[in-house]
Structures are given as C-alpha cells and as structure tokens.
Amino acid sequence: MVGGFLEHISSPADVKALDSKNLPALCQEIRTTLVRYGKLHGGHIGSNLGMVEATVALHRVFDSPLDKIVFDVSHQSYVHKMLTGRAPAYMDERLFGTVTGFTNPEESEHDMFVLGHTGTSISLACGLAKTRDLMGGLDGTSGTRNVIAVIGDGSLSSAIAFEGLNNAAEQGTNMIIVVNDNEMSIAEDFGGMYGQLARLRASGGTSQPNIFNAFGLDYRYVEDGNDVAALVEAFSQVKDIDHPIVIHIHTAKGLGLDAEDAAAGVKEGRCEANHWQDPLAAQGNPLGARKHYGQLAMARLEPRFASEPGLVVISPATPGSNGITREFRERAGVHYVDTGITEEHAVAFASGIAKAGGTPVLATSATFFQRTFDQLQQELSLNGTPVTLLVFGAGISGADNTHSGAFDIPMFANIPNLTYLTPTSGDAFLAMLDWSTTSHDHGAVAIRVPGEPILAAERAAATHGGAYPRYRGGTAAETHAKGDAGNADTPFARYRVTRQGTDVAILGLGNMYPLAERIAADLAESGDGGVSAIDASVIDPQQCTSLDTACLEALRKRHSMVVTLEDAQLSGGWGEQVTVYYANQDGLQPAGVDKHMRVLNFGAAKEFTDRVPAQDLYKRYGLTAPQVEQAIRSALR
C-alpha cells in the first residue's frame, strides 16, 4: 500500500482540513497511486492523471454533496472517489475492482449519477439547478447549493453538450461548467470549435470570438490546470456565483506516467494510448475480437480507396478500440473521417454520403449506436440509403452497466428497412462487408462484428486442425426448400444448415453459433445411466431481421423441437420471433403434418449488469452447453 496523506482522507472534509502547503504533496501521492493502480489493475488512467489537481481543488473549495459535482462520462472520477472515502480501492490490491470505473450513487452520496456516456453532464446539471431554483435557491434549503458540471473538450463535440450550454445560459442562475481542455478526445479532437479553443489557450482566454460567450455564458481561463493553488483560487472566486459561468482549464492528459515502466504503448502526455491502460500482466496478449475483426475489415477496405473515391470509413471517436489503427488512418487520408463524439451526426452524415453516391462504412460500439436511434430509423431506414454499419462490442460481456452491448438485437432487428447481419466467422464477416459495400441496391445494413466466442473458436480450429466450419459463402438454399426468406434482396437472408440431423434443430445466432456446434456434438454422444444420443441439426441464421420461413417449415418434416441461442436480450429479440412464428402457424398445417413445434429460447434477461464476467452471465442465462443440453433432454422426455 501507498502511505501518506491519502490514507487519512475519508471525506472532502479531510481535504479542507489540510494545510494548503500540503496540497501539492497530496496531488503527487494521488498521481503515484494512480500510476501503480494502472500498472496492476488497468483502467482510465490518463484522464484521471490530468484531473488530479482539479479534483483536489473542487473538493477543497466546494462542499459536496450539498454542492453537486457532475462528472461528464465520469471515467475521470477515480480521484474524486479517492477523496470521498474510497481511496483503499485504489491503494490496496485486495480491494481493486470493488468500486466501479464511473460515478455510481450506490457507492457514495457524492456521486450524482451513473455515467458512462458522453456530453450529458451539463444537461444533468441544468436539471439539478432548475430544481434548486424552484425549491429555495442558493441558500441550500433544497439540498443543493452550487451545481458544477465537469466536462472534457472531447465531450464538447457531442450535440447534447451544446444543447446543455444553450439551456444553462437561458436558465441564467448558478451553474459552474468546468471545461477540462487537455487537447484530446480519445484520439485527437476533430471539429471547427477546436480552433477556437486553441486560440483561447494561446491568448490566455482573451481571443474572440469566444464560443462560450456566444452562448451568453460568463467565462474565465486557467492556463495551468495542473496547478492546484491556481485552481483553488479560481474556484473560490466563482463559488456561490449568481449566474452560469465556464471555467476553462488547460490540463495535460496522462501527466505523470513513466514511459519506461508503463504498459505497452502508454506514455506521458497527450497520447491516444493513454485513454485506457491495460495492466502490465496483460502485455503480449493477442488482440481481442474488436481489434482483430476491425483490423480485418480495414485491411479489406483499404485497397479499394485508390479506385473508389466515394468509399469512406467513419468513426465517431473511439477508433483504436475497434481496430482502426493510427497507421490505417494515416494511409486512408480523406477516406477516413473522425467526426468526434457525435453518433447522431455520424449516422446522418453517412446517409448524406450514400445519397450522393458514396459508400460510407460507419464503425462504433453497439452501446454507442443506441445514442442515435432516431437517425438510424429516420435518416437511414426511412430514406433507404445504402449505409454500412459495423457494430462492435455487441452481445453479452463483462462490461460495466453503461457499456453493455446486450440490447442491440431488439433495437436493430426491429427497425424497418434495415438488415442486421450476424456473421459466424471472419470469412462470413468479410463476405458480408464485401456485399454491403459493393452493392447499392439495398437499404441500411448493419453487421454485428464477431465477438470473443467466434474468435476463440477460430483460434482453436487453427490450433487443432480446422475443426471450426469454414464459411462457404452464398445462400444455403440447397439445404432446404426454397421459399420466402424475408429480405429477398439480401443474399444472406436464408439460414445455413451446417449440420443435418433429426429431432432437434439448434439455431445459433452470431456469437452463439460455436455453442450450437458444441451442443450438437455433445448430444450426439450417448452416456451412462441410459442417456441416449440425440442427432441434432445446426443452423446459422446469418441475420436476425427476417425469418427464413422456408427453412423453418422444412424443419417440421424431421424435427420436433427448435432451440434458439442468442447472446442478447431475449425479450423483444430474435428467438421470440421464431417462437411466435411457429405458434401462429401451428393451426395452419396440412393434414399429416405435426401441428406443434416445440421451441426453446435462450438469451439474456432484460437487465443491466455491471462488470459481471461473461462466463458468469452465460451461466445465469442458461447459455452453457450443459444447461442447454439438460433443457433439451428434459423437454424430449
């Protein structure tokens, strides 16, 4: 453990009690603790290192929780947590992981909201301030006095941040907006407003036009945002102010990282790798699914840039986490656009490119696509523009409760005129990408980038002689009778029957396809105690936006049960559609055909989960081979 001032701080009152001359030492101790924590545990270390002095100054001056501090995104809240009674979770290795990576009211009264997405702090702060104004004002009788929103310059590119600034000025009462300007988003900042911020930095906050003044907001600038004394003075001057004001502080992201010992790629200063630090123990690990398949996609697209001037890759920030490497971006030049943290704009922008005859490929996380549902429905689907969406991080995972990808199928699969493809291998993924970007006679196409279960299966096959079935391309019409498969213009509308069996048909959607293969193999083996072998079919549906009714009807001839597997929310999802189809069709079967098809659905519950290991979630939802096998055998008795 690290000793000194920090181990004696259990609340902001202890920060206030320190002699002012000891504040720099406290900041240095926090910085040392953060670097050690990052090496051993990992996390959002760079953003926190840049905010050490500002957070200490906030708690030195303001009186949390009477004064409400809202951290935008809140990945920079580790220091705040240390100063509000949770320092042992960062100092004691035995307690690592006992607090979340973001603010969380269940942990502390000093945390206002559960936050993990971008640009919302000012709007949330406006709501806190409005209620305070209605219920007593700055005298504190409402339970709120000063309202402080802390937002980074990268988050300012998010549309909702501008909406919040606009409303804060209109309210006209106490609100303190701390803009942490470290000249970085995750990668570099992109957008016209950043030239203005640069001019404000260069002029000591005096240049015009001033974007914040243009909103009608008061403004002050602190050049050295890593000088705790300067920040204490600046915050003291605006405490209890009677109107909204922006305090623009210039900080250094990653300040204090020692490059020699830090995890690979992480170094002091404004560096993209500083956004997230893996622990030292993770060095040398192979790429995860996001980066692996993302790099495959970019490698597939890059040779086409020279001959296809309208081909454009779009990333609303977060490129590196999706395998869009810095080297690729540099080579792509004008064929790559980082729009900043602007998912709504990015989708509408992509629709405009497609309408003009270009070929846009927009890549971001499933959880971030949720921020642009209206544009997915209106600007893309209603207009029928041929945009390709690469959906990363979809499915069940051990992510925190603000970054879950388990809600993607109910969202994407129920938007009209949008096709959601679910590849089950790298080959299938690239085949789908080729089709969606070379054919323009379709509407919006989203491709669910393969996840860890598929990558693990492919790597295991490569190690053990190729047991994982290779994607053969085309449709699977040869495996069942032809018929309406819904999206007639989509070559992936038909389900692929990869293993023909009897009695039970197992449909493994996307990431669950390797599980379907394993279950079928296990069922085929007879066991002790009278356990008989079951010959099961295995089916790769390829997509989840329409039902291959010809395949579903063909299954009636040899099967009495259909099992659906999906690693997403079951309620409102794909498996339920299969169940409803059979339920509606059972009474319409001709004479001699069994009227009843038994369907078992397996998927995630409708719930938020927070850092629960994926394997534990699979067990919780019955998505393991033994659990599914037991359910099948019980149902067949």
Image (spheres, rainbow, N blue to C red):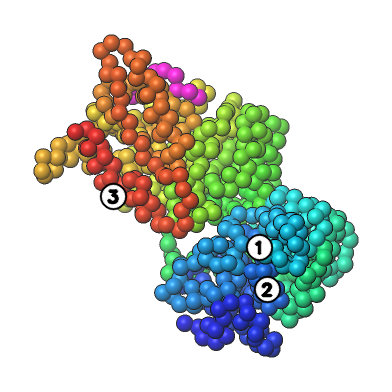
Q: Residue at x 67, y 43 (%)?
A: 344
Q: Nearer the viewer, mark 3 or mark 2?
A: 2
Q: Are marks 1 and 2 in contact (CB under 8 Å)?
A: no
Q: Label 3 vs label 2: CA separation?
A: 61 Å
Relative image position of residue 622 (x, y in whole percent):
33, 45
Q: Is residue 618 visible?
A: yes
Which residue carries the number 2 mark?
A: 63
The secondary structure type at the circle numbered 2 is loop
Residue type (three-letter) at the residue carrying disc 2: Asp
Q: How far from the left and from the top, in percent, is residue 552? A: 36, 24
Label annotation for residue 70 = 1
Pointer 1 or 3: first along the chain: 1
Residue at the location (47% across, 27% down)? 546
Q: Nearer the viewer, mark 1 or mark 3?
A: 1
Q: Spot the residue most to the left.
A: 529
Q: As shown in the figure, which amino acid type bears the numbered disc 3?
A: His
Q: Is residue 156 visible?
A: no
For mark 3, what is the residue?
464
From mark 1 to mark 3, how far is it between C-alphas? 51 Å
First-in-chain label (1 vs 2): 2
User: Is 227 or 305 nearer to us in this picture?
Assistant: 227
Cα separation, mark 1 vs mark 2, equals 13 Å
Say if the magenta span includes residue 249: no
Describe residue 107's horizontal placement relative to residue 630 as left or right: right
Q: Residues within 10 Å of mark 3 (few under 14, many from 20)?
A: few
Instruction: Please name the amino acid that badge 1 sits on.
Output: Val
Image coordinates of residue 524 in percent, x first then y, are: 20, 37
